[in-house]
Structure formats: structure tokens, C-alpha cells
Image: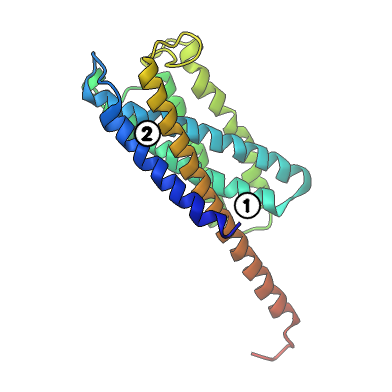
Amino acid sequence: MKKAFPIFALLTLVLLSYALYEALVAAPTEQTMGEVQRIFYYHVPSAWTAFLLFLVNFVASIVYLLNRSDKADILALVTAEVGVVFCTVVLVTGPIWARPVWGIWWTWDLRLTLTLVLWLIYVSYLVLRRFSSGSQTPLMAAVLAVFGALDVPLVYFSIWYFRTQHPSPVIGRGGSLDPRMTRVLLINWAAFLCLALLVCWSRYRLERLKREVEETQALEALLEPKGVR
């Protein structure tokens, strides 16, 4: 696994570079919005990646609640961390795209509001993990994650069943995206998924090592004779 990491990191870098070229150069210019539409190739894949990470966080949290697995707890933590980063990208690129298209930076559109709520839930999750050191912290965080994940389908399906300023789904049922744009979109999503996996992989190894060191130090302190410094 140690040898595979740098190889995967290199492949991810190559894919990200190719995706950047496809999004900024090769993809056709959208007729209505023009060049600003190219932010779409980062906004949408970031959202999909965040949703997927929060789904993994949900599953890992359920596993932790069932058997108190330390590995599941670590996986839940790192996917929440990386998921918040991608969700932040969504909330930053959205207003940048909205300003020239809608004429405003922000509107309390249903999907926007639900995405902000999702971000706040997982930021709260990370704050809880960071500043609460009690033995019940992982348990409380897992419960919060399970409830937080319920917001993901609300965000995703909001444009299917409610009136919002967001356009209809770009691919799948009712999608009308140019096939060339769909190709570039999926390439960028693949690149973002590889990046997310790379960061999660790195954070998982680091967090596991950190906990092993803390356990060793705690054991040494417990076995150390009284009065010995």
C-alpha cells in the first residue's frame, strides 16, 4: 500500500491536469452564459463528491454505532473533513457563478439553503470532534452524522420536486446537456473523486498513526512506576 500511494498520487495529478485542460480549453462555450459557465465543471463535481463523502461518513457512522469500530470512526472523521472542503468549494463557486447569471451573489433558493444547512451540520460535526475530548464524543458525532446525512437527498432531489432557481438536472432523466459537456463534466468528477480518495487515504493513515501513538503513550504512563518522572 505504501508503494501504491505515490503512484496513485501521480496519476491523480495527471488526471487533474487533463481535467483542467478539458474544462478551460477543450469544452465548448455555452451559448447563453458564455465563458462563466465553465465554473460548472468544478461546481457540480464538487457537490457530487461532497455528497458521496457524506454518504460514506453516514455508513461509517452506522458501523461505529453498531460495533464501536475504531477504523469506522476514523473513516467517518476523515470523510467528514474532506467532505466539508468540497462542500465549501460548492458554496464558493456557486455565488461566483450566480452573480453574472442571476445578477446576485446569493438568494435563499431551496437548494442553496439546504446546501448551507448541510455544510453547517458537518462543520458542527468537526467542531464537536475537535473541541470535545470526552469518551462519548465519537458516539455523539456518529449520531449527528446520521441525522446530517438525511439532508443529502433533500439537496439532491430539491430541483426534482420543488421550484428553485437552479436548472433542471443536467444529466440523466430530463437532462439536456451537450454530450461534449457531459464528457468533460464526468472527467472532472473522476479527477475530483481521485483527489478526495487520495486525501482521505492520507488522512486515514495519519489519524490511525496518531491514535496508535496516543494509545502507546497512555499505556506507558499507566505502566510507569509511581514517583518516577
Residue at x 71%, y 46% (from the top left corner) = 64
Can residue 155 be seen here? yes
Mark 2 Cα within 10 Å, few/some/many (few <14, many 20+)? some
The percent position of residue 26, horizontal first and vertical second, equals 29, 28
Mark 1 vs 2: CB contact within 8 A: no
Q: Which mark is residue 91?
A: 2
Question: How many callouts does the rendering have?
Answer: 2
> In the image, residue 131 lies at what x, y percent?
53, 56
Q: Residue at x 46, y 26 (%)?
A: 114
The residue where tag 1 is placed is 74
Nearest the camera: 211 or 119?
211
Where's residue 35, x and y in %?
Answer: 22, 25
Q: Which of 203 and 192 is in front in this view?
A: 192
The kind of residue tagged 2 is Leu
Q: Is residue 186 above or below residue 194?
A: above
Q: Quadrant of residue 189?
A: top left
Q: Is residue 118 above or below residue 126?
A: above
| Residue occupying image coordinates x 58% and y 60% | 2
Using the image, tell me which numbered label, if any, was put on residue 26. none
- For disc 1, the neighbor class at 10 Å (few under 14, some 14 to 19, many from 20) is many
Q: Looking at the picture, which amino acid does disc 1 mark?
A: Ile
